[in-house]
Image (cartoon, helix red, strand yellow):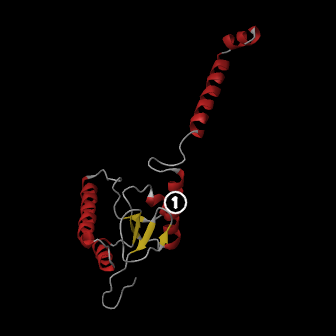
Amino acid sequence: ISSAASDVYKRQPWVRLAMAAVTGVAICAAGWMSRPVAPSGYDAESYDEWKDACRWLDENTAADSLVFGPREGFALKWYANRAEYVCFKDCPQDAAGIAEWNRRLWVIHGWAESAYADGLFDDADTEELHRLTGITHILTRRLGPFESEPVFTNDRWKIYEVPVPVQNGVGSR
């Protein structure tokens, strides 16, 4: 730095403040630009496919649909704009909410253990899931096999529509 510039720097405290601010902004910008493009546990391609599956739910299911999402899911409610029956990572903070969250986890565990005893989730199993929970769609990467074909698939994710049990002639697939 020239002596004239050095004198201004010493005599004008705002110059030091401006230099510190510029340096801080440059450091923050460098950090922001180097941040990961996907959340922890996802590479960019996996994250894009996750968002694609959630977008399908948003565009192709009723607003009151109830989704059974995977444990490794990320912001399903936000990306799909659909309710999730239970999210393992989203534990409520009040006593009643924690009790209901835990009950729902056990409902899913009991259903999966019973339904998969024969190595296949058939339509009767998924109808039972709907009866127990009201779930209308299953978004999964690993759960299966299912008797039904998925209504959506990409390289990583599948979405299954849960058949609604027929009661008094009312109900559908």
Between 79 and 73, the one lying in front of the other is: 73
User: Number of callouts in the render?
Assistant: 1
Horizontal arrangement in the rendering, residue 6 relative to residue 85 (left or right): right
Between 155 and 4, the one lying in front of the other is: 155
Q: Quadrant of the C terminus?
A: bottom left
Horizontal arrangement in the rendering, residue 5 relative to residue 92 (left or right): right
Residue 96 locus on image (x, y percent): 25, 57
88 versus 65 height, above or below:
above
What residue sits 74% from the left and 8% below the top? 3
Direction front: furthest residue: 119
Residue 91 locus on image (x, y percent): 32, 53
Query: Quadrant location of residue 1?
Result: top right
Q: Which residue is mark 1?
A: 49
- Tag 1: amino acid: Glu
Between 143 and 105, the one lying in front of the other is: 143
Question: Are there few (<14), some (14-19), or many (20+) residues within 10 Å of tag 1?
Answer: some
What residue sits 33% from the left and 86% below the top? 166
Residue 63 locus on image (x, y percent): 46, 71
23 versus 140 height, above or below:
above
Query: Quadrant location of residue 141?
Result: bottom left
What residue sits 26% from the left and 55% below the top? 98
Q: Secondary structure at mark 1?
A: helix
38 versus 107 height, above or below:
above
Query: Quadrant location of residue 72?
Result: bottom left
Residue 132 locus on image (x, y percent): 27, 73
Horizontal arrangement in the rendering, residue 77 relative to residue 20 (left or right): left
